[in-house]
Image (spheres, rainbow, N blue to C red):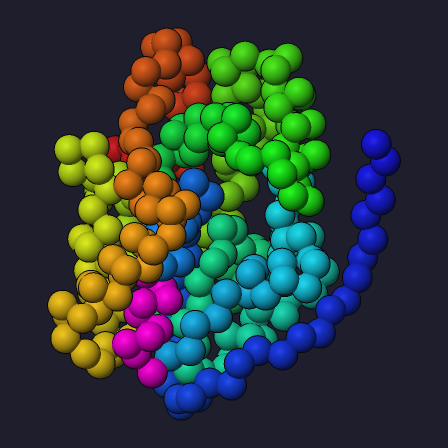
């Protein structure tokens, strides 16, 4: 199979903000850190606030632009490889609730000033690595991405778990997806740990929503009763089988099941990043 990469420019319209005078807010979340349920939370927040939801990655996907190379996770996203940074310009527009990001361009992160109006959902990088390995076997192989998934499975079959976790390619990936947020974290953006919302092995979606809403309370005013808002979120999750599975079936501290030597080597390689995210003292 031959792959050809071409630099392209796209132009598309976004929905008009209904309250452009309001400061836009941002919900970022790292890969494998409750992405699906985070999107449901963002959409519920938008429904009960004056802010218009804006998921740039979904819009790009709808017009055929692959933001992430699902066949090769080592490749940087289109955001990171772009020579220009239209996301910075987009931030100048008020009235939106941005979500759907997994990683951001360094230039965007360095210039980002909306710290109080933002929150990042983070996860232990060691578990992200494990989740990355196992996700290949869970994805369906139908549709346009099916061939890529099958190829990934074939490539992965030649590599055992420990070799994958300690490979330079994976470690570089884990460093990249955390360090892209480093400038924002150093400025004081709020961090919420994915692991903190598990109770008795299940993900507490209501607690997750409440914490995000509280973190953004000064910038995302909610109009409606709390019970109505939670009911809307529950309905979004329960009406989607895939979302319901994603919202309740996650696991944490998977890396602790690894051999001690692998844990130590992986932790040492990611020490600076784990400290930044609050996973090491």
| The N terminus lies in quadrant | top right
Q: Magenta: predominant secondary structure element?
A: helix
Count of marks placed on residues = 0
Which image quadrant for residue 51?
A: bottom left
- Judged left or right of residue 80, residue 280 is left
Query: Which residue: 31% across, 36% down?
Result: 249
Q: Give the range drawn in magenta.
A: 41-50
Q: Quick check: can you spot residue 271?
A: no
Q: Does the magenta stretch include residue 88?
A: no
Which image quadrant for residue 245?
A: top left
- Judged left or right of residue 229, residue 89 is right
**83 shown above or below 171:** below
Query: Which residue: 63% across, 53% down?
Result: 67
> Whole-percent x and y of residue 40?
36, 59
Query: Which residue: 20% across, 64% down?
Result: 231
Q: Does the magenta stretch include residue 43?
A: yes
**167 shown above or below 173:** above
| The C terminus lies in quadrant | top left
Query: Which residue: 44% across, 68% down?
Result: 98
> Whole-percent x and y of residue 99?
44, 62
């Amino acid at each position: 199979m031959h792959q050809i990469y071409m630099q392209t420019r796209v132009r598309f319209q976004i929905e008009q903000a209904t309250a452009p005078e309001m400061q836009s807010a941002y919900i970022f979340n790292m890969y494998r850190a409750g992405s699906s349920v985070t999107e449901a939370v963002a959409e519920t927040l938008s429904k009960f606030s004056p802010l218009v939801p804006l998921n740039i990655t979904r819009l790009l996907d709808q017009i055929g632009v692959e933001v992430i190379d699902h066949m090769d996770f080592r490749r940087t996203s289109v955001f990171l490889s772009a020579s220009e940074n239209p996301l910075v310009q987009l931030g100048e527009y008020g009235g939106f609730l941005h979500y759907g990001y997994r990683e951001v361009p360094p230039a965007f992160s360095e210039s980002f000033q909306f710290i109080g109006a933002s929150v990042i959902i983070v996860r232990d990088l060691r578990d992200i690595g494990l989740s990355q390995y196992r996700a290949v076997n869970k994805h369906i192989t139908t549709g346009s991405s099916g061939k890529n998934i099958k190829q990934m499975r074939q490539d992965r079959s030649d590599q055992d778990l420990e070799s994958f976790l300690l490979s330079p390619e994976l470690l570089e990936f884990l460093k990249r997806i955390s360090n892209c947020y480093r400038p924002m974290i150093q400025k004081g953006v709020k961090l919420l740990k994915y692991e903190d919302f598990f109770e008795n092995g299940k993900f507490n979606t209501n607690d997750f929503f409440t914490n995000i809403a509280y973190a953004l309370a000064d910038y995302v005013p909610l109009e409606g009763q709390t019970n109505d808002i939670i009911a809307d979120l529950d309905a979004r999750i329960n009406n989607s089988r895939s979302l319901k599975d994603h919202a309740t079936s996650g696991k944490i501290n998977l890396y602790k099941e690894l051999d001690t030597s692998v844990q130590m080597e992986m932790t040492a390689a990611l020490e600076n990043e784990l400290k930044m995210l609050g996973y090491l003292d």
